[in-house]
Image (spheres, grey):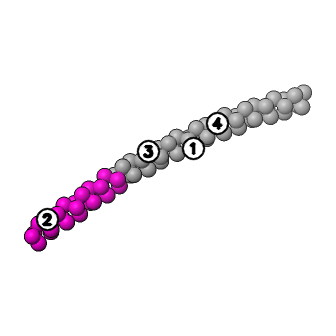
């Protein structure tokens, strides 16, 4: 009977370990996905900022040209 209890407890522990492993792997995958999304968002923001700065520069150059005339 003791061996049966030990066997059952071992099975329970194995199941718990399996659940932990699966959940940890899933969480790691989700975090990696979030990191990729975060990087893409940062890249988009940087591109938008660069475009805005180019536009500002162009407008300032236009104003400068008009002032010099």
Q: Nearer the viewer, mark 3 or mark 2?
A: 2
Q: Are marks 1 and 2 in contact (CB under 8 Å)?
A: no
Nearest to the eye among marks 1 and 2: give it. 2
> Looking at the image, which is closer to me, 20 or 15?
15
SS at mark 1?
helix
Label 2, on which residue?
A: 7
28 to 67, vertically: above or below: below
| Residue at image mark 4 | 48
Crowd rating for badge 4 (residues with CA inside 10 Å; few <14, some 14–19, many 20+)? few
- Nearer the observer, disc 1 or disc 3? 3
Direction from residue 22 to residue 49 in the image, left or right: right
- Residue 33 — which label? 3
Nearest the viewer among 48 and 6 is 6
Magenta residues?
Answer: 1-24
For marks 1 and 3, give the CA distance: 14 Å
Quote the CA–CA distance across marks 2 and 4.
61 Å
Mark earlier in primary sequence (3, 4) = 3
Q: Quadrant of residue 55?
A: top right
Q: Earlier in the sequence, mark 1 or mark 2?
A: 2
């Amino acid at each position: 009977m003791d061996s049966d209890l030990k066997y059952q407890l071992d099975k329970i522990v194995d199941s718990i370990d399996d659940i932990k492993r699966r959940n940890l792997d899933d969480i790691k995958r989700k975090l990696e996905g979030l990191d990729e999304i975060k990087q893409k968002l940062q890249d988009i923001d940087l591109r938008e900022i660069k475009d805005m700065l180019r536009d500002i520069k162009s407008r300032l150059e236009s104003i400068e040209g008009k002032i010099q005339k």
